[in-house]
Amino acid sequence: MTTMQSGLNIPAGLSATAVAPAAAPIVRPVRAAKPADRHGWWWGTGRRKTAVARVRIKPAKGNDAGISFEVASTSKAGKKDPKNEKRITKTVEQYFAEMRDRNDVLEPIKAASLQDKVTVIFRCHGGGTMGQAQACKLAVARALLGYDPTLEARFREMGVLTRDSREVERKKYGQAGARRRFQFSKR
């Protein structure tokens, strides 16, 4: 038996104002925390364009908290023998001159409220400063996820766990560039 209310066929037991039951919220399983390596570090790797960043994170002890970059200056001897490689430590302000790049690197740490609670060491190579900063951001987020898996929902919402896959398109033969053709002359 159906009733006609404002031109709709609605079963007798239901009214037009009946609310459908709310769908159950999607519950994602929480990852288990990854164990630290034998020295107490959590590692993360990030890439952007041709830049690659490796990050180590460790809970700070006392006044040990800080963020630093290990810049490996390889001489000719260092390329042949990694033991001769000189490592120079720089702060974020020294390594990244642009404020935008510094903010990119520190974004996951600030979101997790761990500014003065962890020691972070970066090693990055390849690409430019912006690519390195964004590679570092992804690496930090992945390392923090191993340290504290409950941060995953916040990081996903912020978009810091997504790898930006855009890379430079290769140059094609018979053309001036990736898309650019050589100048065409009709006559």
Image (tube, rainbow, N blue to C red):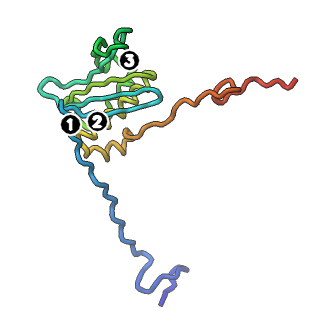
Q: Which residue corresponds to mark 3?
A: 97
The three-letter code of the residue at mark 3 reads: Ala
Question: How far apart are the two marked residues, 3 and 2, measured between alpha carbons?
Answer: 24 Å
Label 2 close to label 1 by CB (< 8 Å): no
Q: Position of residue 81 (x, y in %)?
A: 32, 14
Foreground of the two, 48 or 79: 79
Foreground of the two, 33 or 120: 33
**Nearer the N terminus, badge 3 or badge 2?**
3
Q: Position of residue 19 (x, y in %)?
A: 39, 72
SS label for mark 2: helix
Foreground of the two, 21 or 93: 93
Q: Which numbered mark, 3 or 2, is in the foreground of this view?
A: 2
Image point 43% across, 26% down: which residue? 51
SS label for mark 3: loop
Question: How far apart are the two marked residues, 2 and 1, measured between alpha carbons?
Answer: 10 Å
Q: Which residue corresponds to mark 2?
A: 143
Q: Where residue 36 is drawn, which disc sits there? A: 1
Image point 44% across, 86% down: which residue? 12
SS label for mark 1: loop
Q: Position of residue 45 (x, y in %)?
A: 35, 33
Q: In the figure, 187 relative to 47: above or below?
A: above
Pick out the residue farthest to the left. 62
Q: Which numbered mark, 2 or 1, is in the foreground of this view?
A: 1
Question: How far apart are the two marked residues, 1 and 3, measured between alpha carbons?
Answer: 32 Å
